[in-house]
Image: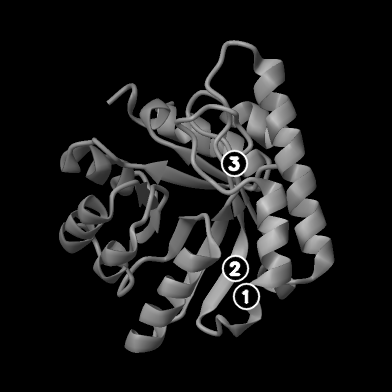
Amino acid sequence: MSAYKEILRRAQSYQATLVVVSKMQPDEKVMDIYQQGQRIFAENRPQELQRKQSLMPVDIQWHLIGNLQKNKIKLIMPFVSLIQSVDSFELAHSINDYANKINRRANILLEIKISPEDSKHGIPYHLLIESLSKDPWSALSMINVMGIMSIGSLCSDQSVTRSEFKTLRQHFDELKKSGLFGSQFTVLSMGMSSDYQLALEEGSNMLRVGSAVFEDK
């Protein structure tokens, strides 16, 4: 069984969606995974996402999982299926404005910072709650907030990562219970190549796995 098939089997056993992260992978390797049945891929750079989308089959759903600068929104908005890395009201507002311009709704996840590592992005949960209380999120009529995303700490102590995932699951449950984003708020995106099994055990329903999928290719 290929690495891809094994990871897909595990994801499906938890009823989780597998997003294959294709960043830094040659196009032919991405197409090999596509030929095995995968239809959801992600990139962390808008320019590379735009390039791959222009070359790959049209039935692929593309996600952006990396930092999105406001001036790059126009590169991906015409086709992107999900922007997983929205970490401020200001960015959400800019996405909404461009979505209005091209008359295409935008699906997004709110990226929450759960790791103390400086390399990890996202908005701290308490600041998100503050923003939700003071900023006019309900006025963003062209945005669907589908859930939340985060990246766990990269460390050898699995208990640290598990604790972070437990915390994120609590945040997800609190936001869902609040009803702020309606019934569409269903996605808890956590878990990557090094920690996806922990993420599944802690309630993730969307994995973002790259290198582990391609390791035997």
Determine crowd level at label 3: few under 14, some 14-19, many 20+ residues with C-alpha closer than 10 A. Answer: many
Q: Residue 76 in the image: x percent, y percent?
A: 29, 66
Q: Name the residue type under label 1.
A: Trp
Circle 2 residue: 145
Q: Viewer-proximal residue, 93 or 45? A: 93
Compared with 209, 216 (above or below) is above
**How many numbered tags mark residues here?**
3
> Disc 1 to disc 2, how far (Cα)?
10 Å
- Distance from the alpha carbon under mark 3 to that under mark 2: 17 Å
**Residues at circles 1 and 2 in contact by the CB criterion of under 8 Å:** yes
What kind of element bears circle 2? strand
* 88 or 64: nearer the viewer: 88
Which numbered disc, 3 or 2, marks the residue closer to the eye?
Answer: 3
Residue nearer the viewer, 109 or 191: 109
Q: Amino acid at mark 2?
A: Val
What numbered label is drawn on residue 137? Answer: 1
**In the rendering, at what x and y percent does residue 167 appear?**
75, 38
Instruction: Name the residue nearer the viewer: 77 or 58.
Output: 77
128 to 157, vertically: above or below: below
At x 72%, y 17%, the residue is 159
Mark yes or no: residue 71 visible: yes
Q: Amino acid at mark 3?
A: Lys
- Name the residue that disc number 3 marks: 113
